Every structure is written in structure tokens, then in C-alpha cells.
Image (cartoon, coloured by chain):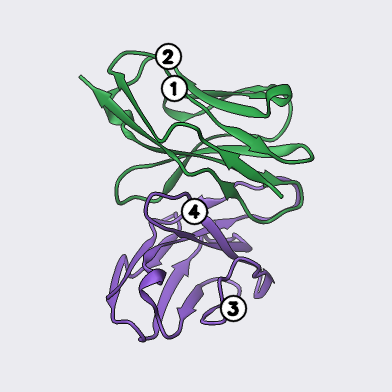
Amino acid sequence: GAGVSQTPSNKVTEKGKYVELRCDPISGHTALYWYRQSLGQGPEFLIYFQGTGAADDSGLPNDRFFAVRPEGSVSTLKIQRTERGDSAVYLCASSLRQGGPETQYFGPGTRLLVL
Amino acid sequence: AQSVTQPDIHITVSEGASLELRCNYSYGATPYLFWYVQSPGQGLQLLLKYFSGDTLVQGIKGFEAEFKRSQSSFNLRKPSVHWSDAAEYFCAVGAMGGNKLVFGAGTILRVKS
């Protein structure tokens, strides 16, 4: 498909476990973003990649959260020692990043439930 | 710091009636403004955006929005609502050269027949 894809669509895990969430951006988009959307809230920024490097990770809530984008395309958001409060929808977006204003295109999200 | 306020958590309109969803932002410079729509279990779909120029912008599905700098607002409008418009609508602001969007809490639109 031509859009942003995310896998899995749903993930149920137990408190304390490790999870990985994957994002495949639109082909050719150099910028990639992760957001977290808690129930009843708007998305909140987590981290932004330009190419392979994390250009801004100011939104990561603590050091249990980490994200990588080793080849400048697919990205993985990693959460260690999950807590019930991590339950949310994790959204990925991508943009062309050619300078100037950018439109971010969102994937369908991964719904994470920590029991 | 940027912030977005969507004062209405829920709005219910009759099918065929007009719609206006409110959005107020706080940002010190010229903002980039967006409206996204999210249907249950779906990702965010871009409805329209304002970067510069004409302050009345047209989007998909018959939506439009007007940027009013003096009121720090970017309200979304539609002249005649269809039942398929029922969804949650998010206003977002971005900064020139910035990388993140700041979203409002969303407005849930219900359409009654």
C-alpha cells in the first residue's frame, strides 16, 4: 500500500514485559514521528527521526521508551518493563521533510494493552 | 510553548445541518494549522491545512476552515453534515522549522437522523 503501515494492530502484554511496535513509513519520506494517544486525548508527540537519527526525543516519557530507525526507513518503538499506564494507541506518521511546512501522514496505530 | 484548545468535547448535529467545530491555539509566531479526522479504530486522516496565504482553506469531504489571527482561531465548518461525518476531529498546530504537532483533545461529532 501507499500509506503508513504499523504492526501489530493490537498488542496485549503483561506488566513488566518488553514490547516492540513497528512502523513502515510512506516510501521516500525521510521524516518519521511517533505519537501516543491515550483514551479521550489527542495524540502526544514522542520522538522524531530525520533519516536514521533521532532529531528530537523530548516527548519520550522515561528511559523505558526507546526507538530506532537503523536504515532510515522502518522504525521500531521499544518499551521495556511495561506498565499499565503505557496502555494507549501508538501512532506513527511520516513526512517528506524537504524544508518548510510539512504535512504528516498517519498510520492506523497500534493499540497496546498492558494487563 | 504551543497549545491547542478544542472547547467542545461532544457536539451533536442533525443530518443536513451546518457544523462548526472550534479550535483556539497558542503560539508566538505564525502557526501551521491542521484539522484531522479519526473514525473509530482508524488512524488520523488529514482534512485540511493552513500554511500561509488565503485564510479560508478548503479541504476534503466539503470541509473548510478559516484562520483568524486576531482571535487565534482556526474553526472547522461544513454547510451540510452527512451521517458519515460522525467521527472525532482534532485540531493541531505546528511550528515553522519544527518537527512535532501539538494536538487538541478532540471533538466527538455525533450526527442524528
The C terminus of chain B, quarter of image: top left
Disc 1 element? helix
Q: Chain of mark 3?
A: A
Residue A27 vertical placement versus B110 (above, below)? below
Q: Nearer the viewer, mark 1 or mark 2?
A: 2
Identified by mark 4, the residue type is Pro
Q: Do labels 1 and 2 touch, CB within 8 Å?
A: yes
Disc 3 element? loop
Marks 4 and 2 sit apart, C-alpha to C-alpha, by 28 Å
Locate residue B101, reporting x and y percent. 61, 50
Q: Colour of chain A?
A: purple
Residue marked by disc 2: B79
Q: Residue at x 64, y 36 (%)?
A: B25
Q: Which chain is green?
A: B
Tell me, for residue A71, which label it has, or none. 3
Q: Nearer the viewer, mark 4 or mark 3?
A: 4
Residue marked by disc 4: A43
Along the viewing direction, whichever of A81 and B54 lies nearer the viewer: A81
* Discs 3, 1: same chain: no
Q: Residue at x 44, y 50 (%)?
A: A41
Marks 4 and 3 sit apart, C-alpha to C-alpha, by 26 Å
Q: Residue at x 35, y 86 (%)?
A: A17
